[in-house]
Amino acid sequence: MDLIDSHCHIDAEEFDGDRQAVLDRAAQAGVKRIIAPAIHAEGWPKLKALAEVHPQIVPVYGLHPMYLDHHRFEHLDALRDWVARERPCAIGECGLDHFVPELDPNRQRDILIGQLRLARDFDLPVILHARKALDEVMALLRRIGGLRGVVHSFSGSHQQAMKLCEMGFMLGLGGPVTYERANRLRGLVRELPLEHLLLETDAPDQPGSGHRGQRNEPAHLPHVLHAIAELRGQAAADIARQTHANALRLFTLSTLPA
């Protein structure tokens, strides 16, 4: 099975000591490509350099809301220049985080709006972080218009999920779906349209139930796949085939040669 990890921070310092081994394990597990969204401007050059050395890595550039202290409004202009030059497959990771109280919501919103407008101007999908802020993020998507993308680590309601699907967005599912106590999320997974789902790890964060307390990595993606297949009562190969096609379509990626 060919798998695409649609959200993995493979450039994180947690992987600096053994990144090649992590990538080798991912390839052995069938994870042929890793979408790697940046978190702040200082990290863009490192991510670009890693992608040049490791063809598995597909770099994406953006300004993550949880790293607000790193961001300056001039970074939006820098991001426009970076995107025009590097031609990434998406903008992100961007979004809103209202879970962390010290993150200024107005400044977060302004930086997100700048990135959404940039994605619209370049006709690129957005990789969205929306924690305790999904309704507001969805309102901004409607306000800007002409957008597509994925809400990663989706944890919203069935109604929100279906509205996002109607808007042309995809929903990223990762380690949380493997936990038996995640009743609402696991119930959603049984019902959501498969053509709107993506598999992700969010490594090194959000390990699944079989790796709790450990560093997550893209080789664990098959655990997410099999959990979803079991919940839906479908063959893992069918889930893999469709989610792989979904990622190719959203990010306009070519099929890898056999």
Image: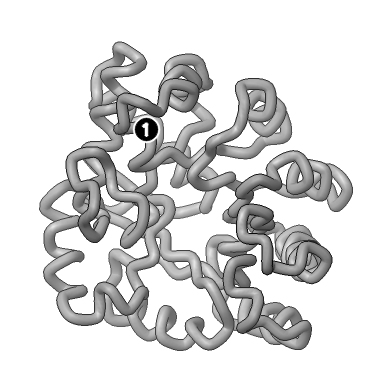
Q: Residue furthest front?
A: 101
Q: Decide: is 213 above or below 155.
A: below
Q: Position of residue 77 (x, y in %)?
A: 75, 84
Badge 1 crowding class, 10 Å Cα cut-off, few under 14, some 14 to 19, many 20 or more, is many
Going by the numbered disc 1, the residue's amino acid type is Val
Q: Residue furthest top?
A: 233
**Residue name at image x 43 percent, y 81 percent:** 48
Q: Secondary structure at mark 1?
A: helix
Q: Position of residue 128 (x, y in %)?
A: 61, 53
Q: Position of residue 156 (x, y in %)?
A: 60, 33
The reply to whether residue 27 is visible in this rendering is yes
- Name the residue carrying label 1: 177
Q: Decide: is 86 above or below 3.
A: below
Determine which quarter of the picture holds residue 117: bottom right
- Tell me how many marks there are: 1
Which quadrant of the rendered structure holds the N terminus? top left
The reply to whether residue 121 is visible in this rendering is no
Determine which quarter of the picture holds residue 19: bottom left
Determine which quarter of the picture holds residue 75: bottom right
Q: Decide: is 81 above or below 165.
A: below
* Residue closest to the eye, 213 or 159: 213
* Residue closest to the eye, 104 or 254: 104
Look at the image and name its color scheme.
Answer: one colour
**Residue name at image x 37 percent, y 85 percent:** 49
* Residue closest to the eye, 50 or 131: 131
**Residue name at image x 48 percent, y 83 percent:** 43
**Residue name at image x 71 percent, y 58 percent:** 123
Say whether residue 214 is left or right of residue 186.
left
Q: Residue furthest right?
A: 143
Q: Position of residue 111 (x, y in %)?
A: 76, 70
